[in-house]
Every structure is written in C-alpha cells, then in structure tokens.
Amino acid sequence: MDEIKQLQSIIDNSDNIVFFGGAGVSTESGIPDFRSVDGLYNQKYDYPPEEILSHTFFMRNCGEFYRFYKDKMLELDIEPNAAHKKLAELESAGKLKAIVTQNIDGLHQKAGSKIVYELHGSVHRNHCMKCGKFFDARYVKAAEKIPYCDECGGTVKPDVVLYEEGLDDSTVRGAVNAISNADTLIIAGTSLTVYPAAGMVHYFHGDKLVLINRDPTPMDSAADLVLHSKVGEVLGQMRV
C-alpha cells in the first residue's frame, strides 16, 4: 500500500481530524514561506525581516515596517489551492473538526473552512491602536504609507502576532482543545521549529499522526505516516 492509499485509509477511518498547518500550505498559492532558500528570511532588505516584524520595530519605525509588510506580506488577490479546498470539503463532510494554522493569509476561510484557529493572527483584521476601530486589509494596503484611523487619526495595527508579542489566549485554548480531542492529527507544511506554536502538537494523544512536509521535521520519527511532498499535491488526491 503506497503512502497516498495509506493516508486515504486513515482519513476514511477517522471522524475527528485536526489539521495543523504552516507556511508550506500556502506556497502552492504563490505565497513565499519564511525559512526556505527562496523564502522571506533569505531576501535582502535594509533590516533583517526578523527585526522588521518585531513589536519594537513597529513602534519605533512604523513607516519602514509598513513598507515591508505591504510589499511582502499583504497578498490580497491570492487564491486557495488544492490543500485549502480539500480541507474545506473534509470539514463540510464532518471529518475535519478544526484547522490550526500558523499562517496569516486567510486562505482557509476563503476556501470555505469555518473552524480555523489562527495562531499568528490575520492580515484581514486590523484595528486602530487608539480607538479600536476595525479596518480590513484593503484599507491598509491602500494607505500611502502608514494607515491611520479615519475617525480619530490613530495608527492602525494589523492583528498579526509580531516578535515579542504573545499568542492570543482564547485562540491557543481552542487549538489545544481541538488537538487534544482529535483521533487523527495531520501536520503539514511546517518545519515544527517555531514555538510556542510547534509545541502544541504534543497535546495530541489520538490514534494516527500524519506528517506532510517537503523537508524532514523533528517529529518524523513519531509519525504513523510521513510524506515528503507538497501539501496540495497530496491532499488534492484525497476522496472525501
């Protein structure tokens, strides 16, 4: 039995699947990942991306933050790929109970998924730091430099978890609860090196652990099935 048939069998025999995904889930939609050879962290800017994407940098050099953020991270016309679409189908069929994602692109919701725990926030939610007014991503993208609130003039900040910031407590609780109750956990498109998010997989005590990632991960040896392939190419072959 090959790996695709094994995965199909696991899905067929599961009724509480949770999907834990990282940047590799969206690369097939054209969004660059962070740590691969051609990812964001290996491109050259005036400052290292890790510094730009920090709370301190945002507060001290907001204009430069938004120059990078709008140019490299605010992809608003990208479409979901086969992975996003198949996960939405699995949820509709009652197989998949939740998605836990490290991505901020909103592609799971765009594909139709309903229960999505966004550990690192979303580019589609933005709020004025002064009055709290909500703004969508297109408002931020359209701003000449720094987006300011059209009511009070405060700086608008994306609901994206920057370095030095903590994860949202309610999102973490929801994700941990989903993972701990799953009978199958599918981890895909993540190196499992970004904490605290990666540590959440240790709450899984179910039956089958599946890993889909282009490169090996620290969890490969613990998995029941490992596929070193593109996530969309694998999930796109699954029958619901």
Image (cartoon, helix red, strand yellow):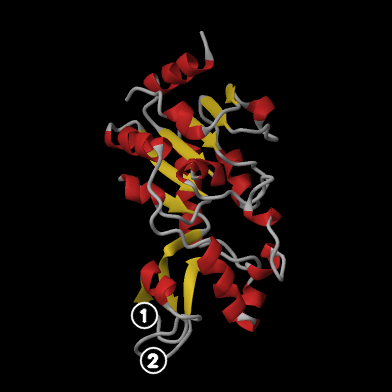
The image quadrant that residue 92 belongs to is: top left
Estimate how packed mark 1 is, as few (under 14), some (14 to 19) or many (20 or more) residues with alpha carbons within 10 Å: some
Does dot 2 land on a helix, a strand or a loop?
loop
For this orientation, the residue located farthest to the bottom is 152
Camera sees residue 61 = yes
| Residue under the point 59% across and 49% down | 33
Residue 154, position as x, y percentages in the image: 45, 88
The image quadrant that residue 66 belongs to is: bottom right
Camera sees residue 183 = no
Q: Which one is nearer the viewer's eye here, 207 or 82?
A: 82
Residue type marked 2:
Cys
Mark carried by residue 133: 1
Q: How many marks?
A: 2
Mark carried by residue 175: none
Lateral position of residue 85 relative to residue 52, left or right: left
* Pointer 1 or 2: first along the chain: 1
Alpha carbons under labels 1 and 2: distance apart: 9 Å
Task: Check disc 2 and report the residue beneath it.
Answer: 152
Answer yes or no: do the residues labelled 1 and 2 have beta carbons within 8 Å?
A: yes
| Residue under the point 55% across and 67% down | 69
Residue type marked 1:
Lys
Does dot 1 land on a helix, a strand or a loop?
loop
Q: Which one is nearer the viewer's eye here, 104 or 206?
A: 104
